[in-house]
Amino acid sequence: MATALKPHRRRSFALLVALAVTLASASACSSGRAAPGPEQNAQEEELPPISAEVLQTVESAEVPTWIVTTGSLIAHDRSDVVPNVPGKVLEVLVERGAHVEIGDPLVKLDVR
């Protein structure tokens, strides 16, 4: 069985609930940081100004399609080719540096 609260207790309970809600709202709204004081404002004002300089003006110009230079190329994969039988090479079937697969014929041999 629930008992009804007396009028003065009802008012006290309502005030207690209102106080709890107010405190909860105030703590939820605070960010934990104090407002900047005069010391912080003075420090921010002492920073030197930032300057920007134009280093070079962009201009339109002709760009060469070809550039002549010197260099060396090295293959990523390299393999020595040695025949299993002696003989004379009759014909080379691939160009130097061409991509080949395993089992592709590279030369024709005269094995007489």
Image (cartoon, rainbow, N blue to C red):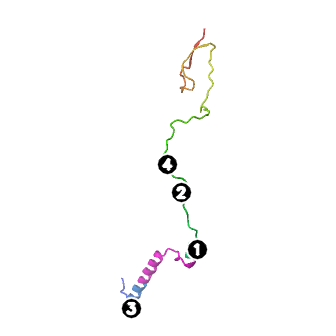
Nearest to the observer: residue 52 or residue 103: 52
Q: How many dots with numbers?
A: 4
Q: Which residue is mark 1?
A: 43
Q: Look at the image and give the residue range highlighted in magenta.
A: 17-39
Residue at image mark 3:
8
Q: Position of residue 10 (x, y in %)?
A: 38, 87
Q: CA distance from mark 3 to mark 4?
A: 86 Å
Is residue 29 inside the magenta stretch? yes
Which numbered disc, 1 or 3, marks the residue that appears first in the sequence? 3
> Residue 65 or 103: which is nearer the viewer?
65
Crowding at mark 4 (Cα within 10 Å: few <14, some 14-19, many 20+): few
Is residue 18 placed above or below 105 in the rendered structure? below
> Which residue is at a point 63% across and 24% down the rendered structure image?
80
Q: Which mark is residue 59?
A: 4
Q: Are discs 4 and 1 less than 8 Å apart at CB? A: no
Amino acid type at circle 1 is Gln
Q: Locate residue 71 relative to residue 5 in the image: left or right.
A: right
Q: CA distance from mark 4 to mark 2?
A: 14 Å
Quadrant for the N terminus in the image = bottom left
Question: Which quadrant: the C terminus?
Answer: top right
Q: Cα distance, mark 2 to mark 3?
A: 77 Å
Callout 1: helix, strand or loop?
helix
> First in sequence: mark 2 or mark 3?
3
